[in-house]
Image (cartoon, rainbow, N blue to C red):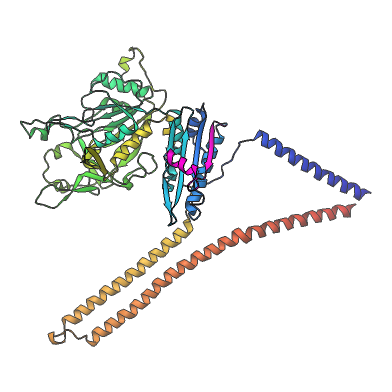
Amino acid sequence: MNAITKRASGGLVLLLLALLFIGATVISNLVLRGARVDLTANSEYTLSDGSKEILGKIDEPINLYFYFSDEASRDLAPIRTYAQRVRELLEEMAGRTGGKIKLSVIDPQPFSEEEDEAAAAGLQSVPVGTTGNKLFFGLAGTNSLNGKAVIPFFQPDKEVFLEYDIAKLIQNLLQPDKPVIGLLSSLPIGGGFDQTTQQMSDPWAVMQQLSELFEVRPLGLDPKTIDPAVKLLMVVHPKALSDDTQYAIDQFLLGGGRLLLFVDPNANADTSGNDPSNPSAAMFADKSSNLQKLLGNWGVDYKADEVVIDRALGLQVQVSQTEPPVMHPLILGLRTAQMNDQDLVSAKLDLINIDTAGHFKLKEGATATLEPLLQSSSEASTISIERIRYLPDPRELLKDFTASGENYIIAARLSGKFASAFPDRASQPGHIAESAEPVQAILIADTDILSNRLWVQVQNFFGQQLISPFADNGDLIVNSADNLSGSSALISIRGRNSSTRPFTVVEDMRRAADERFRSTEQQLQEQLSETERKLNELQANKSSENAMIMSPEQQAEVQRFQNEKVRIRKELRDVRRSLDQDIRSLGSRTKFINIALVPILVIIAALLFWNLRRNRRRTVMGGN
């Protein structure tokens, strides 16, 4: 009777535990609905604060249409993996809006209405294989006011900016009007009368690109106020700006406006000092620009009489029609190594050309943040602007050159909370004494970066201008304007780590094998060189009659080299074979751990637990 009672009690306990589990599951589903824990190494599914802020501002429904061709991508494993990543991020964003984002996942079949809708929305299709199938992999969005935005194709190599691209699309649907750029420039960037040619000139190519994406409003050379509709102020080559204009810029920034600033120690496009009657006057004209009062107030050090010289990045230029091109250490081609690959503005660019650029750095004790976008190499230094007033041969600059080892900041992102540079105007109506939010600006110490000659060829084709870029200067400027004209939330979204996890152990093994391979290959090359040297010595000692006949010594030397070559080739094959064997062994061990070892450990743990419970039960039964 006692044993029966215990069995009944045990059964009752199990039933109560089952009911408790079901109740806990129901309660957790109700209380913890939508709660998530991101356990990925790079927090891939955790949205940044900027994205959350943008999603929190949605007050009207937004429709997102994610187009992905499932059948066409069947054999493209990397694309399918990335598509899953995109879909999960979209679902995460939609889930945070309480239904305000309506996400539709569409597989556009060939010759279907969905395929026509994808093409009409502006998505790009990529041919796959030889069957003629088209791969769609993009996002279209609409708002309640018929506003539209699109990501034509999700490029896997831009995965680090995936969250930014989607958040930007959503923000564009929230604010569908073109952002307004206010332009303050002393250079003829927007076209105008050219004093050199005495003719009207076309707008620079960079302005044509900006005009396609933004509403650009010229503000004149000395504005006293900045139109409240201006989202971004683009200041190019500010020369001797009045205090009133600098105060207007100061108040614009403290009030939440953004700044894209171009200053230059030597602006080659500055023709203001040219005198047609005295051509040599241009050589001694002041072509520098500065915004000293504001830059100094922000804690930024910039010298308008100093240019960066770099012997590692100089471009080849033609200084004379009778001589070949020479390397110019002031006209530089910045490559990816000199660009910030973690910033949306400069990442994914390949080449930026600059000419006699200055540099920035923070003053000691400055509270601002100055994040480099473009830098010189470490083979650089600075020289006075006086040294380049008359420079027939740029090679002269390198005769007494000594690199400082410093990477000079040529372009940077500036942010920080600043007080007004004009505290003496505190009594003026509407004066802003200090910024409520961090000021956002991008500073570039070169204006020639904007000029056509450094990045683009413009040709006239039956009245139409054809633009053919050979550098990425235009993309840098458009990226800067695009990023700064967004909300503070959008600017705060930075590049994320890729979800692709490299096989670091395998890469280390492959790198070690490559080093051994190169070492062995070098040994073979040295043996070959030594053999050729000995053969030449033997050949030199022969008479002219026997020059075409190999001596026994030469034959022995050739045979020795052939034998050595066979031995070294065998070593090279052994190195490769050893690498393949090591990788296969690592794969086998990994498979064993994943497929066999873990289940075996689980089974062993279960058996131990079962045996422990059985022993306890026997002890209880024995005690009774």
Residue sitting at the far right: 1
Kindly give the residue lying farthest to the left in the view shown: 277
Snapshot quadrant of residue 94: top right
Q: Position of residue 123 (x, y in %)?
A: 43, 42
Which one is nearer the viewer's eye here, 116 or 241? 116
Query: What count of labels does the image hold?
Result: 0
Magenta stretch bounds: 99-121
Q: Note whether residue 553 is visible.
A: yes
Q: Position of residue 9 (x, y in %)?
A: 86, 45
Along the line of sight, the residue nearer the viewer: 204 or 290? 204
Asked if the stretch drawn in magenta spans residue 103, the answer is yes
Specify the quadrant of the image occupied by residue 605.
bottom right
**Residue 421 sits above or below residue 115 on the image:** above
Q: Residue 72 at x, y = what percent?
A: 48, 52
Drawn side of residue 360 relative to residue 578, left or right:
left
Tell me if residue 421 is in the magenta stretch. Answer: no
Q: Is residue 43 visible?
A: no
Q: Is residue 204 left or right of residue 336?
A: left
Q: Nearer the viewer, residue 288 or 454?
A: 454
Q: Quadrant of residue 255?
A: top left
Left or right of 10 on screen, residue 82: left
Above or below — where is 560 with respect to 430? below
Residue 459: where, in percent of width, then height?
21, 41
